[in-house]
Image (spheres, rainbow, N blue to C red):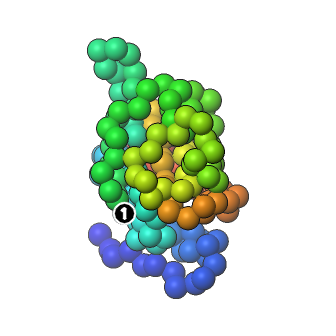
């Protein structure tokens, strides 16, 4: 296990280009899903310093399926999210990435931290079923753009191989 190297470039794209191969390498040597997701969170947060980053996993409960909090880094977070609820539940329902530039304008947003201003959620799929979502919160409005989308999808594709 090597230490994560963080690019000192000011370019977001350069940082991702430096980060993705390291995540790829990290995942090569471990097949346990939780261990892999935990290190993916740490690697992204070490690189970008986002307010909160974590995975919610789709789990069976007495009342049906729910998103349950998985590996994360940052302040405490809500533990369960229903299908279609919040940004995470919506990304699960619609099986698509959702990027929110201002969380106050997303009608159903679930506020885990009052500091969060913008958010991006990327679903992880197996056989066309959402198994988990990656959720990232920033304390800056419109923090995420097409570059984040492209590389976060790439990272989630790598993580999907562990589902
Ligand atoms: N804001 C999310 C809830 C999870 S926290 O941000 C960690 C949502 O609306 O689904």
Q: Position of residue 119 (x, y in %)?
A: 55, 52
Q: Which residue does the image show at 34% across and 14% down from the upper left?
A: 63
- The answer to whether residue 56 shows anywhere in this view is yes
Residue at the spot 50% in from the left edge and 30% down from the top edge = 85
For the point 46% across and 64% down, which residue is it?
A: 50
Q: In which quarter of the image is the C terminus?
A: top left
Foreground pick, 140 / 34: 140
Residue on which the image places disc 1: 42
Within 8 Å of ligand 1, the CB of disc 1?
A: no
Which of 19/84 is in front?
84
How many circles with numbers are drawn on the protein? 1
Q: Is residue 163 visible?
A: no
User: SS at mark 1?
Assistant: helix
Rendered residue at 32%/38% (across/down):
79
Q: Which residue lies furthest to the right in this view?
A: 146
Few, some or many C-alpha atoms within 10 Å of disc 1 (few <14, some 14-19, many ≥20)?
some
Is 69 on the left-hand or right-hand side of 146? left
Percent x, y of residue 37: 37, 51
Query: Is 84 or 134 nearer to us in this picture?
Result: 84
């Amino acid at each position: 296990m090597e230490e994560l190297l963080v690019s000192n470039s000011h370019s977001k794209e350069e940082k991702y280009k430096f980060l993705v191969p390291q995540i790829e390498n990290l995942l090569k040597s471990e097949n346990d899903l939780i261990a892999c997701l935990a290190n993916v969170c740490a690697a992204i947060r070490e690189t970008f310093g986002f307010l909160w980053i974590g995975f919610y996993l789709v789990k069976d409960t007495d009342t049906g399926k729910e998103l349950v909090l998985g590996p994360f880094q940052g302040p405490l977070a809500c533990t369960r999210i229903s299908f279609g609820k919040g940004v995470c539940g919506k990304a699960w329902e619609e099986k698509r990435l959702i990027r929110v530039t201002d969380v106050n304008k997303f009608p159903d947003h679930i506020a885990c931290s009052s500091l969060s201003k913008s958010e991006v959620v990327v679903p992880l799929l197996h056989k066309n079923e959402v198994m988990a979502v990656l959720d990232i919160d920033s304390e800056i409005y419109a923090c995420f753009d097409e570059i984040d989308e492209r590389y976060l999808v790439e990272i989630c594709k790598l993580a999907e191989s562990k589902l």
